[in-house]
């Protein structure tokens, strides 16, 4: 049985979940990156993350099972097209975090709208398909010699800008999940 | 021989280096965290990072030798006292990124002043000595179930707030290194 304190904490966290903010991992496979991304997603209130995982979902869920996976489930998709269709169907704007020339500064974007942020893998970056298929591209300024940031770092920098905007807009102040989902997650999290 | 393009790039990067912004790693040892932190430091223009490394400097430098170490040297210290004395001697305010109750929101701090940000290890966090000995404690808001962020993620979130403030204050617009140091680093970076 969960303690009263534990139940109260779960309720508080669920009351701050942001069902309209998510991350899409395009071929991100390194376990420590997946774990760091899931943890940051949890911290900013992302409800679930998406993974484009051409080899199928099995290995991914095993790898993510390092900690935070329970609080931030990973939804796997077999292709960019499948992932983007699902997200667009749910009303998300899709923004690719990409080091391309036509990317906008990540701070110029309005993250209070339903937003999915796509990030890519260490060596290959984001796939051409995922970048071009997005509604826009965003970039974090780099003033140094290295050509990019670590993927979990880049994800966090963007998510904390989203959090800043969402705090200012009051999106953490009142529950955003529908009551049925809130209730289902409360039971799931409290009685594992 | 470096190409003209390479030399121009090195000059540009040196012209944006921030000699009065740094990170102190208190017992951070995991190579992928060290590498991610060094890379973010490079990206925001940190000139060198500090490591409190009670077992001595050797293993650290070997571990960091994964990439960005060349652009962001690591200065090792045997104790918190030694590190803090060196930083205070150089005019830095020391801010511990710590999940303690009396920490201020990290966005309330003025990072345009000479600032050293202290971060701790995955399991133990920042040492009591490093936290209490700092000039202040700062915390990144967490709205989820997990009790903390990954250390390289936390470092990046704070450094990009510092970058935001420093961009607004014009600190990336004109060279900040003294000419002799600029020249020395130019030679070091261009002719490895
Ligand atoms: C290590 S980077 C990939 C580098 C890859 N060689 C490339 O050229 O794209 C891994 C992922 O992190 C994200 N990322 C890293 N640095 C970024 C930045 N400065 N702006 C936006 N996204 C970034 C992108 O999603 C990228 O695909
Ligand atoms: C994984 S955390 C350490 C957790 C450790 N169990 C504790 O209680 O301190 C590693 C380091 O990242 C930094 N950090 C992580 N999350 C943070 C947050 N929300 N605010 C400030 N610093 C944070 C701190 O420097 C911390 O020592």
Image (spheres, coloured by chain):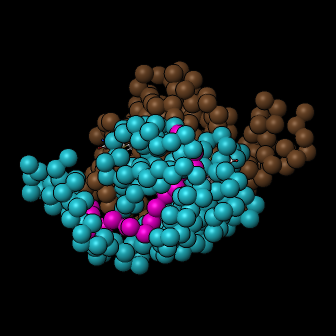
Chain colours: A brown, B cyan
- Determine whether, in the image, residue A81 is placed left or right of residue B179: right
Q: Residue furthest bottom?
A: B169
The reply to whether the magenta stretch includes residue B19 is yes
Question: Residue B104: x, y in percent?
Answer: 67, 67
Residue A36 visible: no
Q: State the residue in front, A138 or A177.
A: A138
The reply to whether the magenta stretch includes residue A149 is no
Question: Residue A179: x, y in percent?
Answer: 77, 48
Question: Residue A15: x, y in percent?
Answer: 74, 53
Residue drawn at x 39%, y 49% as measured from the top left: B39
Residue drawn at x 68%, y 56% as measured from the top left: B129
- Determine whether, in the image, residue A45 is placed left or right of residue A120: right
Give the quarter of the figure containing the C terminus of chain A.
Answer: top right
Magenta highlight range: B12-29
Q: Identify whether A20 is placed above or below B95.
A: above
Q: State the residue in front, A170 or A83.
A: A170
Residue B175 visible: yes
Residue drawn at x 51%, y 31% as measured from the top left: A31
- Determine whether, in the image, residue A169 is placed left or right of residue A191: left
- Determine whether, in the image, residue A66 is placed left or right of residue B113: right
Q: Identify whether A141 is placed above or below B114.
A: above
- For residue A29, what is the image quadrant? top left
Question: Residue A34: x, y in percent?
Answer: 52, 36
Q: Identify whether B71 is placed above or below B20.
A: above
Give the quarter of the figure containing the N terminus of chain A.
Answer: top right
Residue drawn at x 46%, y 61% as measured from the top left: B22
């Amino acid at each position: 049985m969960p303690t009263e304190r534990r139940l109260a904490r779960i309720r508080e966290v669920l009351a701050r979940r942001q069902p309209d903010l998510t991350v899409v991992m395009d071929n991100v496979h390194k376990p420590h990156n997946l774990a760091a991304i899931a943890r940051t997603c949890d911290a900013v209130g992302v409800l679930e993350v998406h993974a484009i995982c051409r080899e199928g979902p099995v290995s991914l869920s095993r790898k993510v099972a390092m900690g935070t996976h329970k609080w931030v489930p990973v939804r796997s998709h077999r292709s960019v097209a499948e992932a983007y269709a699902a997200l667009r169907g749910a009303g998300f704007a899709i923004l690719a975090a990409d080091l391309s020339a036509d990317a906008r500064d990540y701070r110029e974007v309005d993250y209070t709208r339903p937003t999915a942020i796509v990030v890519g893998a260490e060596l290959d970056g984001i796939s051409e398909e995922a970048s071009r298929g997005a509604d826009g591209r965003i970039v974090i300024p780099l003033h140094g010699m290295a050509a990019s940031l670590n993927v979990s770092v880049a994800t966090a920098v963007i998510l904390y800008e989203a959090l800043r905007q969402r705090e200012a807009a009051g999106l953490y102040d009142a529950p955003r999940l529908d009551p049925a989902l809130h209730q289902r997650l409360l039971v799931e999290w409290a009685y594992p």
